[in-house]
Image (cartoon, rainbow, N blue to C red):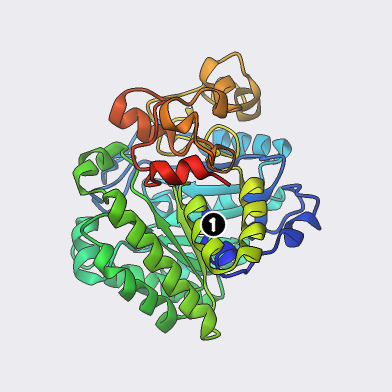
């Protein structure tokens, strides 16, 4: 992820990271992306079941019961292993994680073992009762998917009334004092709503928003033709930067990030190089600490059935199953060719990625997207929007 507010608006300085020694166990959550040990943040899809019908769902979820999900005890063994391994964050996802009855028990178990527990939810089931439970547990953060204003969001989510229920869920978290943020997946059908999303952040005093570039996985594979063109992406990232700067300039700062396209890092740097070369040098230092795409290193995924994936979108590849071996063993076993390659992926990317001057801070961008389009894991990511001149220039 690329912190627009951290980098472009100066919310983070290199010294903020260095004072903690860049150790993930010591870093505050908003600085974890700059850790040097890259202990994995783990996304656990605790259930595949979901009450909505999102057109871009990477897990192709339905509102039915699935019989292959990890049990409560299997989940606790996973969480114990992750805590011992040093994973700093467990992100409970789905499907819709709040549909799993033992979610509070699992979240409490993780928190009791020193992990930061967060959930990624559609927000429609965040009732007063549920939020009160999460508050008592000490949940660190609730990320709520909101893919546009009412008309667009309901169409995207496949269920009328979803927007109103989601907004109510956000407000309920706010009232309980739980940090909450918006997750917005960019595509051609909703980018015109981005200004309204920024207005909503301000009106509702929502402190954080993550803008996700589209990944072609699950039902999202059908949306390739609705992904932004390179020029549309550049204009959209500029818009996000401009609106973030406006909030900071008016004394109403928000934490704004873009996710799943590490070309955003060089793009932010190049713009700042024109505006403020001194700050650009600091951005470069932070981008080098970030290291770009961390699939298979700083981010990992455990599926509902226990399969271990390089990230939550790359579901056609499994390194093993936590019912058979602990996650920590699977994650450090480089006898699997792809796991070994992901630990040092810069040696294996091809095409323009291999000669790109930004490789050290991009990490080759999103391999799952490259594979989805070309069939080749190591081919250039088709969503990279940097020009040939820009990638030759590098840092």
How many numbered marks have been drawn onto this rendered protein structure? 1
Instruction: Residue 43: tell me if it is visible.
Output: yes
Lateral position of residue 87 relative to residue 185, left or right: right
Residue position for label 1: 269
Q: Is residue 316 above or below residue 261?
A: above
Lateral position of residue 386 relative to residue 19, left or right: left
Most extreme residue toward the bottom is 250
Neighbours of disc 1 within 10 Å: few (<14), some (14-19), many (20+): many
Q: Position of residue 229 (x, y in %)?
A: 26, 49
Residue in front for this viewpoint, 239 or 71? 239
Q: Is residue 292 above or below residue 245?
A: above
Q: Is residue 99 above or below residue 375?
A: below
Residue in front for this viewpoint, 144 or 360? 360
Lateral position of residue 110 relative to residue 239, left or right: right
Q: Quadrant of residue 135?
A: bottom right
Q: Position of residue 27 (x, y in %)?
A: 73, 55
Q: Position of residue 343 (x, y in %)?
A: 60, 27
Q: Position of residue 100 (x, y in %)?
A: 43, 48
Residue in front for this viewpoint, 255 or 360? 360
Kind of element beneath mark 1: helix
Instruction: Residue 45: tell me if it is visible.
Output: no
Lateral position of residue 114 relative to residue 324, left or right: right
Task: Tell me the residue at 51%/86% (across/down).
Answer: 250
Task: Tell me the residue at 46%/79% (across/down).
Answer: 246
Task: Tell me the residue at 28%/72% (across/down).
Answer: 164
């Amino acid at each position: 992820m690329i912190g627009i507010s951290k980098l472009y608006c100066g919310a983070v300085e290199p010294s903020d990271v260095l004072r903690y020694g860049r150790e993930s166990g010591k870093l505050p959550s908003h600085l974890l992306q700059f850790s040097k040990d890259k202990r994995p943040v783990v996304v656990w899809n605790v259930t595949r079941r979901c009450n909505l019908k999102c057109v871009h769902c990477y897990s192709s979820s339905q509102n039915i019961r699935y019989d292959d999900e990890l049990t409560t005890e299997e989940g606790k063994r996973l969480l114990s292993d992750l805590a011992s391994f040093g994973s700093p964050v467990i992100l409970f996802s789905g499907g819709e994680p709040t549909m799993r009855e033992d979610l509070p028990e699992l979240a409490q178990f993780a928190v009791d073992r020193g992990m930061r527990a967060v959930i990624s939810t559609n927000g429609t089931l965040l009732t007063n009762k549920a939020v009160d439970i999460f508050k008592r547990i000490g949940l660190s953060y609730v990320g709520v998917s909101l893919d546009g204003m009412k008309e667009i969001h309901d169409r995207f989510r496949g269920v009328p009334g979803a927007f109103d229920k989601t907004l109510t869920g956000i407000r309920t978290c706010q009232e309980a004092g739980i940090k909450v943020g918006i997750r917005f997946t960019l595509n051609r059908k909703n980018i015109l709503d981005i200004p309204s999303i920024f207005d909503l952040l301000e009106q509702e005093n929502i402190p954080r928003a993550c803008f996700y570039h589209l990944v072609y996985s699950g039902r999202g594979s059908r949306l390739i033709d609705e992904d932004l063109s390179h020029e549309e992406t550049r204009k959209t990232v500029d818009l996000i930067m401009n609106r973030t700067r406006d909030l900071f300039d008016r004394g109403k700062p928000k934490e704004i990030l873009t996710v799943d396209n590490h070309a955003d890092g060089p793009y932010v740097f190049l713009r700042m190089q024109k505006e403020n070369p001194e700050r650009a040098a600091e951005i470069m230092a932070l981008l080098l600490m970030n290291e770009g795409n961390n699939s298979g290193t700083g981010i990992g995924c455990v599926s509902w059935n226990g399969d271990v994936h390089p990230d939550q979108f790359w579901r056609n590849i499994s390194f093993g199953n936590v019912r058979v071996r602990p996650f920590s063993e699977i994650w450090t076993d480089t006898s699997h060719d792809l796991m070994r390659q992901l630990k040092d992926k810069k040696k294996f990317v091809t095409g323009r990625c291999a000669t790109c001057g930004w490789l050290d801070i991009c990490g080759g961008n999103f391999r799952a997207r490259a594979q989805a389009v070309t069939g080749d894991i190591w081919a250039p990511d088709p969503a990279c929007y940097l020009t040939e001149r820009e990638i030759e220039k590098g840092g």
